Image: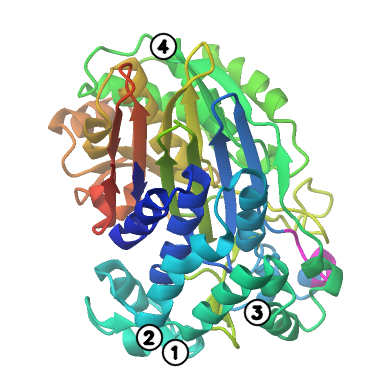
Amino acid sequence: MVASADGLATQAGMAILAQGGNAVDAAIACNAAIAVTSPHLCGMGGDLYALIHDGIGVHALNATGRAGAGSSAAELRAQGHEQMPFRHDIRTVTVPGCVDGWSALSERFGRLSLAQVLAPAIRLADDGFPASPLLVGVLAVLDGAAREQLDEIVKQANRPGSRVRRPGAARALRSIAEHGRDGFYLGEFGDGLRRVGDGLYSESDLSTPGSTWVTPLSRDAFGKTLHTMPPNSQGYLLLAAAGLAEQLDLPGDSQSEHWAHLLIEAAKAAAFDRPSVLHDGADGNALLDACALRLPSIDRDIAARRTAPAFDGDTTYLCVVDDQRMGVSLIQSNASNFGSWLVEPSTGINLHNRGLGFSLEEGHPAELAPGRRPPHTLSPAMATNADGSLVAVFGTMGGDGQPQILLQLAARIFHHAQSPAAAVNAARWVLNGPVTGFDTWTAPQGPHVLVEGHAPTEWREGLEARGHAVRVIAPYDSAFGHAHAIVVESNGMLCGAADPRCRIGSVAGA
């Protein structure tokens, strides 16, 4: 079974499974396809995390990029920057880790060659694909400089369904298929990136594999063991909030506004200090232990005012489980729609802006420096039984809201025994900065609670009565993420769901 935010990508993954590939092969194929069709969400110019259950244990790959050798926080401060530039600045572009991640995944776990696995994506890039409504909609918000950078896509994706071809992406994929990671980082893309960087990236930055296999973070909650990525990922917030929520006597009815209140307070208690403690050298288990001590600070009836930056994100999440019950939970991102709004000019591949997670505060543990990885919102998730067998792979896009969305999915699927479809389709809440959307933990008045329009009416009234600042927005809006899940049922069957909020997502099994 494969679930993703694009039906074409889901079918690419299914095609590889049909050819004898395993879950890792299918996940790479799915990711490569959506990297072609959804450059507003992800792509070869972005970063990647993956969790893999190989039938024995859980493995974690950190394929997020490192700052180039020419990176300098002092230089940015001297130019008057107090925060990392958001758009139109190559210094926010760390070395993209996506392709390095594909290579590491394939080398360790893949069954088929990269040439076979990337073939569906190459066909999509060569022959073209129909522009999705979301792609067309995002193009409308670009400024003039970004439209010039993304000219190839802008000219073609002028209405939903119009054919979009990406010959430069096809060349890059062919080079990867033939030469592996070096075909990308030391080929046409890498040469162009170094020219754009003008000293930001050294040859060593691109020639040295940057992906690392790391120990996943794991904690018991809701009767299962939940797994996610360690720092520099914010995934620890899911485990921390789930551990707190489990001790708050959640109501049996997930429609209750008290259910929403308790989960909101657990999420706030876990996350309010994230900007000061999350960095690539942080100890994830120590962060979890610190969060566990916050249970007494949670008021079961009244909203807390916790303040401590945050941003909405454009990312894609996908998951795969194969016939041997190998499972992959993979998340890949440009950070914020089309990332930096810059492209590598030879291939037309747009570049992420994940470096915006760095701090420019002198001495901050997440201060920009060569070779460092920025704090990341990306948080793939997986769950196992007590005997270590796979239960579920699940995840979402959604920037700062990812752990909050995953907390709601985990509570619904594991605590309330809801089906993946019921859990994914259910109304959600997310915490959001009240002024810019990037001030979730810094605004003095604390965050707003965004509530989906199809939530129970008592959510708004009840949450406001408890002191939450509530805003109701449209049902099934992308602000609440694109979440997908595949669950291995007790009888061995697979049950999955793709999020309707992404409009063209799909889940398919065989």
> How far from the left and from the top, in percent, is residue 164?
34, 82
Q: Earlier in the sequence, mark 3 or mark 2?
A: 2
Indicate which disc residue 80 carries.
none
> How far from the left and from the top, in percent, is residue 387?
52, 12
**Residue 457 included in the magenta stretch of the image:** no
Task: Find the distance from the CA under tag 3 to the CA under tag 1.
Answer: 17 Å
Q: Earlier in the sequence, mark 3 or mark 1?
A: 1
- Residue at 77% across, 58% down: 209
Which residue bears the numbered disc 4?
248
Crowding near the residue tagged with mark 4, few <14, some 14–19, many ≥20 C-alpha atoms within 10 Å: some
Front in this rendered view, residue 272 or 119: 119
Do residues under tags 2 and 1 come within 8 Å of each other at their CB atoms? yes
Amino acid under disc 2: Val
Crowding near the residue tagged with mark 2, few <14, some 14–19, many ≥20 C-alpha atoms within 10 Å: some
Q: Earlier in the sequence, mark 4 or mark 3?
A: 3
Do residues under tags 2 and 4 come within 8 Å of each other at their CB atoms? no
Q: Give the dominant element type of the magenta stretch: helix, strand or loop.
A: loop
Crowding near the residue tagged with mark 1, few <14, some 14–19, many ≥20 C-alpha atoms within 10 Å: few
> How far from the left and from the top, in percent, is residue 179?
68, 70
Q: Earlier in the sequence, mark 2 or mark 4?
A: 2
Residue 409 seen: yes
Element under label 4? loop
- Residue at 29% across, 58% down: 7
Q: Nearer the viewer, mark 3 or mark 1?
A: 3
Side of 409 where 456 appears, left or right: left
Task: Find the distance from the CA under tag 1 to the CA under tag 4.
Answer: 52 Å
Which residue bears the numbered disc 2?
154
Front in this rendered view, residue 31 or 502: 31
Task: Find the distance from the CA under tag 3 to the CA under tag 2.
Answer: 20 Å
Element under label 2? helix
Range covered by the magenta-colored residues? 66-75
